[in-house]
Amino acid sequence: MLDKPDKKFELIREIVSKEENVLSITELCRIAGVSRSGYYRWVNAEDMRQARERRDQEDFSLILQAYQFRGYAKGIRGIHMRLLHLPEPIVMNVKKIQRLMRKYSLYCPIRQASPYRRMAKAIRTNTVEDNLLNREFEQHGPRKVLLTDITYIPYHGVFCYLSTILDAYTKQVLAYVLSPSLELDFVLERVNILVREHSVSLDSQTLIHSD
């Protein structure tokens, strides 16, 4: 930490302020390997640093509220999206969110497994297959190609999430689930609904496609 000039300047100021100190600022700067002019620039910029710290604390409080929204922790991009979806949207770039989270030791939760991989497991496939369709979505007939998607819907100042499974041939929605959060296991529930209500019309050749 003392490799950083700011930390060295802080230490010099702390030593100078002590009554028992006998070293001059010039000597302390020489010992620390920093310039005397640089130290005085740092001292004179104290008001700017304090103003920047106040702004950082205010912005971090918004980040923390977004992080804790609905009672579960979010990643950087989830925080970014939550800030954009406030009644009065807040535009804060991802790099700034990342910097402030690192500064105040706020960590993202461990990334969960992809819901699409869990969906593949739910329909008894062990791997995510290669693209077999070549964008030929309608040539295989009904119940042969199923398309999946997740979208968000604004509702009274908040957002809910809609997960659907669509028959590529008939354009019929075979299953859908609404959720107040992407963190909930609603994608798997959508597959359960599909199997429960349409298993008779599906066979081993049916493909589920997602972007």
Image (cartoon, rainbow, N blue to C red):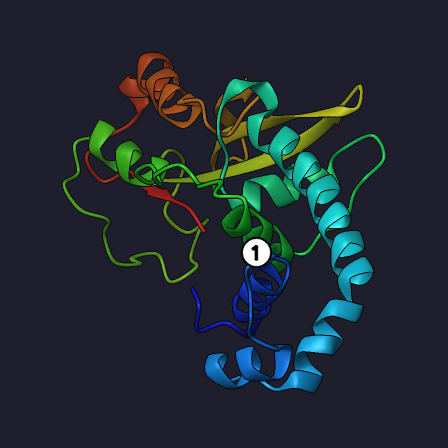
188 over 75 or under it: above or below: above
39 over 92 or under it: above or below: below
Residue at image position (55%, 65%) is 21
Which quarter of the figure has residue 142? top left
Q: Position of residue 44 (x, y in %)?
A: 80, 70
- In this view, the residue in front, 190 or 200, is 190
Extreme-right residue of the structure: 88
Q: How many marks?
A: 1
Residue at image position (59%, 69%) is 9
Q: Position of residue 169 (x, y in %)?
A: 47, 41
Check disc 1 and give the amino acid type.
Answer: Arg
Q: Secondary structure at mark 1?
A: helix
- In this view, the residue in front, 44 or 63, is 44
Pointer 1 residue = 99
Report the side of 177 relative to 190 (left or right): right
Q: Where's the N terminus, which quadrant? A: bottom left
